[in-house]
């Protein structure tokens, strides 16, 4: 565990991303969520770490003369040691429809050419995998997904686009992800989903959470428009 500023602890589980480490992070996060303490402000799971944000004032008042960071680390150690990963936790499986056609997929041909494939082969590979949401970041609701085939890997764009439409599905290196909001970005865009991934007025703003499983399903442009999408 390491301090991250004056009111956060970074718990490192490994230097490399793996499904085993992800499963442990998921179970530890669930334990912390279900055992809320008055000093605990937020839990942020990532690829190989969990960031725990705490209130040092609350900790100090109950443990005068002690370092709030050390006290929190001791309590986290005690809680984490109670976690014994025996079997994978149940994950939500969410179907994400994607249109891989025309102006919605401006970089699909580049990804295909880079891997000596046809565009249809790229689509088939991209939609044949069940992906794991390792973390949410970069922008509200943006899912970093693991499990993409290296056969469709592609480098980031040398010059990022200033605007990438919400719902755009992209590839960068060995990762694929979905832009929930219109933002700048350098990923290769191969399609777009009509499903909103981030709705700030909802009780649960982000459609996806770390630990979810998703599956991309190809749809036609006509089907895409049928969702009532307005560009």
Image (tube, rainbow, N blue to C red):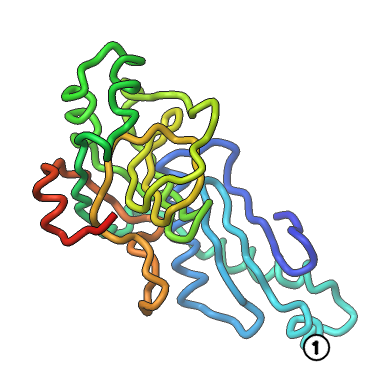
Residue 14 falls in which quadrant of the image? top right
Tell me where residue 102 appears, x and y as whole percent: 22, 34
Q: Is residue 178 above or below residue 40?
A: above
Residue 115 falls in which quadrant of the image? top left
Q: What residue is pinned by disc 1?
A: 61
Q: Is residue 121 above or below residue 57?
A: above
Instruction: Say what secondary structure mark 1 lies in.
Output: helix
Tell me where residue 204 appears, x and y as whole percent: 37, 74
Task: Residue at 74%, 69% (x, y): give it.
Answer: 7
Tell me where residue 23 appears, x and y as whole percent: 41, 51
Screen quadrant of the N terminus: bottom right
Q: Residue furthest top?
A: 116
Screen quadrant of the C terminus: bottom left
Question: Front-most of 225 and 33?
Answer: 225
115 relative position to 65: left or right: left
1 relative position to 207: left or right: right
Tell me where residue 219 appears, x and y as whole percent: 12, 44
- Determine crowd level at label 1: few under 14, some 14-19, many 20+ residues with C-alpha closer than 10 A: few
Q: How many marks?
A: 1
50 relative position to 129: left or right: right
Task: Residue at 78%, 61% (x, y): give it.
Answer: 5
Q: Residue furthest front?
A: 231
Q: Residue furthest bottom?
A: 61
4 relative position to 32: left or right: right
Question: Front-most of 152 and 147?
Answer: 152
Residue 101 falls in which quadrant of the image? top left
Task: Residue at 46%, 55% (x, y): give it.
Answer: 136
Q: Is residue 129 above or below residue 7?
A: above
Task: Residue at 84%, 72% (x, y): give it.
Answer: 67
């Amino acid at each position: 565990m390491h301090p991250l500023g004056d009111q956060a602890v970074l718990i490192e589980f490994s230097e490399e991303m793996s499904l085993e480490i992800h499963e442990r992070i998921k179970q530890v996060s669930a334990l912390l969520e279900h055992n809320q303490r008055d000093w605990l402000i937020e839990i942020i799971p990532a690829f190989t770490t969990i960031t725990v944000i705490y209130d040092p004032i609350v900790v100090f008042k109950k443990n005068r003369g002690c370092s709030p960071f050390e006290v929190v680390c001791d309590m986290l150690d005690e809680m984490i040691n109670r976690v014994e990963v025996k079997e994978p936790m149940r994950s939500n499986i969410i179907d994400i429809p994607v249109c891989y056609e025309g102006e919605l997929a401006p970089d699909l041909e580049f990804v295909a050419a880079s891997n000596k494939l046809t565009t249809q082969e790229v689509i088939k590979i991209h939609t044949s995998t069940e992906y794991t949401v390792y973390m949410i970041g970069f922008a509200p609701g943006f899912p970093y997904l693991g499990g993409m085939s290296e056969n469709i890997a592609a480098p980031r764009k040398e010059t990022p686009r200033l605007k990438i439409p919400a719902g755009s599905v992209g590839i960068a290196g060995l990762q694929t992800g979905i832009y929930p909001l219109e933002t700048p970005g350098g990923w290769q865009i191969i399609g777009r989903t009509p499903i909103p991934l981030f709705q700030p007025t909802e009780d649960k703003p982000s459609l996806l959470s770390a630990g979810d499983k998703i599956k991309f399903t190809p749809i036609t442009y006509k089907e895409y428009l049928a969702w009532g999408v307005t560009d």
